[in-house]
Image (cartoon, rainbow, N blue to C red):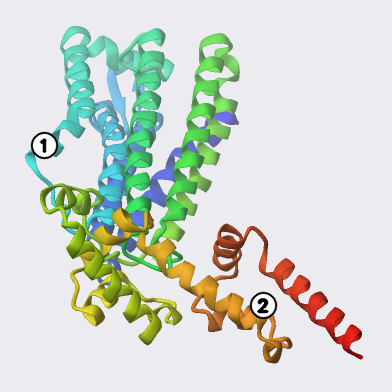
Amino acid sequence: MLLTIKHNLHLLVAFQSLLFLLVLSSPAYRKSRHNVFLALFFLFQTLSESGGIFQDVTKYNPATLTFQGVSPFIFFRCLPFGFLVFPFLYLYVLSITDRDFRLRPVHLVHTLFFLAITAFIAAEFRAKGIIALIMISRYNDTLFIRQEYYNFRLLHILQLYVYILLCCRRLALHRKTIRNVFSSLTEVSLRWLKVFLCLLAAWGLLGIATLVVYNVSFARYPLSFVVFYAAFLCIMTYAFLQSLSQREIDLPGPTHAERKYERNPLSPEESERHLEKLMSYMEDKQPFLSPDVTINDLAEGTRISSHTISQVLNTRLNQNFYDFINSYRVNESLRLLADPGDRRKTIIEILFESGFNSKSTFNAAFKKHTGMTPSEFKRRKDTAVDSRSSHAS
């Protein structure tokens, strides 16, 4: 029964990946460049899982010395595609965090695992030939002895963690970059990708546990495999649903601004002049009251390049754009909270009037700048006002 479930899981994962591939390839989604890489991610997942399906449906007939069903050669031709799945997840992360990303010859390095496994399988076929196919059909085995298969699966999990680390590094650079460009991070933070990578890391540990069972107690391997693949189905569903709402992020590469700082340093006089102009604009026009204000909006209003604004904020105020804007918003919220005429306003009303669009962001920024939550500050102010009123009466 467990072997039947195992086979059905292969079918389900392949069908799921194919379905996600078709959706991402539709006109509504393929116009977003990053979705092309995610579609390829699911394409190679589909091809990889197809191998498991073909392996299970192929039978050998000893009487006629023939194979019934799909040729086992298809299984082994599909097998290496599993080593292209995680490289294309990384390319997806690169494309979504850099609007200028393009595939270049250097990216061929991500095919090394795929090419190595393909070469290994070709060598095994050449060395073992028909004997290997009989082993497959009779014992549902692979071309390799059990230890070789174990090493093969372990290599796949190792590749998973290599690409998780690469993706995490890229997302860390992205997090730093968006704070120099946006004042609201809700739609550009890629938090769901971080969650997805954490789930993949946990899934990798489950894969290691499955391999331990495979090596220690092969009879229990089908059950552990079922749990392993069921978890994979849930994780892929989460990633797909989250990706559908991911819009294109208009953002340069993470290291773009830092390189320009090194090449074009500002003199102290220029830096001071730009800072004074920027502060004057902030006080007069109050752009921070717009929840979606970006550094490009400030550049347009002040006639100072976005690069120069970012450089001034980083070098003179030791702040990124995100913290700079939020400091003004927090000051505005403090003014509103301290105003006796605004005592009846709720925290939600005040955060929106201050330019915030998220309660969690408001609370975090407020506590960072004041050391207390907005509710605590409001409570203290109300208590102080009531106390003065009672003394006056």
Q: CA distance from mark 1 to mark 2?
A: 52 Å
Residue 224, percent across and down?
57, 26
Identified at 33% across, 79% down, the residue is 280
* Residue 62 seen anywhere in this rendered image of the structure: no
Q: Is residue 312 above or below residue 256?
A: below
Q: Quadrant of residue 243?
A: bottom left
* Circle nearer the N terminus (1, 2): 1
* Residue 325 seen anywhere in this rendered image of the structure: yes
The residue mark sitting in front, 1 or 2, is 2
Identified at 34% across, 39% down, the residue is 169
Tell me: 21 left or right of 335.
Answer: left
Tell me: 242 left or right of 159.
Answer: right
Q: Which mark is residue 314?
A: none
Residue 197, percent across and down?
44, 42
Q: Which residue is mark 1?
A: 106
Crowdedness near tag 2: few (<14), some (14–19) or many (≥20) residues, C-alpha within 10 Å: some
Residue 230, percent across and down?
54, 40
Q: Which mark is residue 347?
A: 2
The residue nearer to you, when weighing 131 against 149, is: 149
The residue nearer to you, when weighing 299 against 317, is: 317
Identified at 67% across, 64% down, the residue is 373
